[in-house]
Amino acid sequence: MADNFEWAKSRLPKDAKSIVWGATVHAAKQLPAGSKRGEPMGSYLHRALGDTAAVIGFTARSGHVSRLGATQKDISPASSDSIESRALAGSSENLRYLDRKQLQTLGNAPAHPIDFGQVQAADGSTVLDGLLVSREERPLVRVRPAKPQQ
């Protein structure tokens, strides 16, 4: 994935900015200790680009996830001490953004932006540069059938 990004970036003007949209698990700067996954793309990009790269992750306190046509899966419940619950505490808002300093202030806390099915404790600021926390995640729904391109 990182090689693909570098290939695409090499074909852009030198001062071009890029956004790479991907799953938080792939974009992470590093994974929580004990993770059985390989090194994420984000770690390669951060080594190559330094602070000019930023990883914004996504997570939810509750809800369900699925890919189109796949079986819906429950998001494991967030405990009261989780990043998700603490980010939304005392607010009626459905979304909250936490920057790197706010993640650092929360310290080593349970959360599940890397895997909705598993809560892992980590210092969120070492994994991400920012985190968008949703009160409830809803699975993808096809609104209308896709039309073939002409």
Image: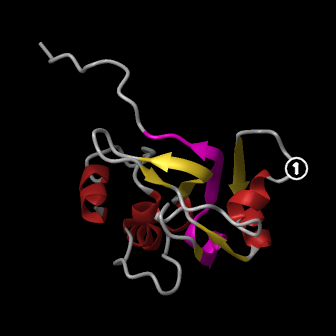
Q: Position of residue 92 (x, y in %)?
A: 81, 39
Q: Is residue 70 above or below residue 7?
A: above
Specify the farthest residue to the left. 150
Tell whether position 122 is magenta. yes
Residue range of the region highlighted in magenta in the rendering: 121-139
Q: Nearer the viewer, residue 61 or 8?
A: 61
Q: Position of residue 53 (x, y in %)?
A: 51, 59
Q: Is residue 124 above or below residue 149?
A: below
- For badge 1, the amino acid type reads Gly
Residue 100 showing in the rendered view: no
Q: Position of residue 84 (x, y in %)?
A: 69, 58
Residue drawn 34% across the image and 78% down it = 38
Classify the position of the C terminus by image quarter.
top left
Q: Is residue 37 above or below residue 13?
A: below
Q: Is residue 54 above or below residue 108?
A: above
In the displayed structure image, the side of residue 36 where residue 121 appears, left or right: right
In the displayed structure image, the side of residue 142 where residue 17 appears, left or right: right
Image quadrant where residue 142 sits: top left
